[in-house]
Image (cartoon, rainbow, N blue to C red):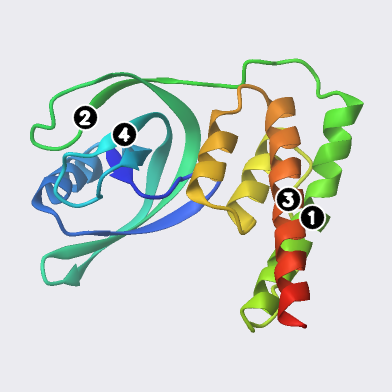
């Protein structure tokens, strides 16, 4: 298990710099196996040194690329492949370990028209939020957002692309159903748009 101060969502990519001895040992075992490990958000504490408090919902990651970058460090690129629940934390010996189980969406039914409607709104909302964030910080405006039509994947992609924080992303990861996830992301991104509009309005005064 790799506890982090950020959330890895299914379908998203993440770059890691591995340098602690315990995680170098973990990486060696991962690369010698199927290339997967779990990623969870640190609720309290630091990524370095241990002693952290970890969330019990996370994402199984698949290593896409791993290479030494000098100084005994490795650069690793992973992609989130599925959501997991931690059943039980084990001793951190020689690195964080846990018993986990897959957590698919609790609903297998066909998405409702309401859910599909919320999903269809997400690309526009995320694009607006990203554009406003770029304007607030004086950065080039980002390109268009393509999230696909699948409600579950689109909601994950929207949460990853939108300018929201790790706790919001964790709430999205923890949503029990695709419908709940689409509704939550729609609300979170809409709220962020209103905050950014307010910041822009204040900066114009």
In three-dimensional space, the C-alpha distance between marks 4 and 3, rounded to whole angstroms, equals 27 Å
Pick whichever of labels 2 and 1 is earlier in the sequence. Answer: 2
Front in this rendered view, residue 43 or 15:
43
Do we see residue 145 in this rendering? no
- Residue ID for mark 4: 54
Pick whichever of labels 1 and 4 is earlier in the sequence. Answer: 4
Q: Position of residue 55 (x, y in %)?
A: 37, 31
> In the structure shown, which secondary structural element does the residue marked by tag 1 occupy?
helix
> In the structure shown, which secondary structural element does the residue marked by tag 4 occupy?
strand
Report the residue at 8% width, 32% height from top. Answer: 93
- Residue 125 is marked as 1
Front disc: 2 or 4:
4
Pick whichever of labels 2 and 4 is earlier in the sequence. Answer: 4
Question: In the rendered picture of this protein, how many numbered marks are placed on residues?
Answer: 4
Pick whichever of labels 4 and 3 is earlier in the sequence. Answer: 4
Pick whichever of labels 1 and 3 is earlier in the sequence. Answer: 1
- Residue ID for mark 2: 97
Front in this rendered view, residue 203 or 75:
203
Q: Quadrant of the N terminus?
A: top left
Q: Position of residue 111 (x, y in %)?
A: 81, 24
- Residue ID for mark 3: 191
Mark 2: few/some/many CA within 10 Å (<14, 14-19, 20+): some
In three-dimensional space, the C-alpha distance between marks 2 and 3, rounded to whole angstroms, equals 37 Å
In three-dimensional space, the C-alpha distance between marks 2 and 4, rounded to whole angstroms, equals 12 Å
In three-dimensional space, the C-alpha distance between marks 2 and 1, rounded to whole angstroms, equals 38 Å
């Amino acid at each position: 298990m790799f506890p982090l101060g950020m959330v890895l969502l299914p379908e998203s990519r993440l770059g890691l710099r591995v340098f602690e001895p315990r995680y170098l040992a973990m990486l060696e075992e991962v690369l010698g196996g199927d290339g997967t490990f779990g990623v969870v958000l640190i609720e309290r504490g630091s990524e370095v040194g241990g002693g952290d408090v970890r969330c019990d919902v996370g994402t199984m990651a698949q290593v896409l690329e791993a290479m030494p970058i000098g100084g005994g460090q490795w650069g690793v690129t992973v992609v989130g492949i599925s959501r997991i629940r931690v059943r039980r934390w084990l001793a951190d010996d020689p690195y964080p370990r846990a018993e986990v189980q897959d957590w698919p969406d609790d609903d297998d039914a066909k998405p409702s028209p309401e859910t599909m409607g919320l999903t269809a709104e997400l690309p526009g909302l995320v694009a607006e939020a990203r554009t406003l964030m770029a304007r607030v910080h004086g950065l080039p405006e980002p390109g268009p957002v393509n999230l696909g039509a699948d409600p579950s994947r689109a909601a994950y992609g929207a949460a990853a692309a939108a300018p929201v924080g790790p706790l919001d992303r964790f709430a999205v990861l923890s949503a029990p159903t695709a419908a709940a996830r689409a509704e939550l992301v729609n609300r979170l991104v809409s709220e962020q748009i209103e905050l950014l509009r307010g910041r822009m309005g204040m900066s114009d005064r």
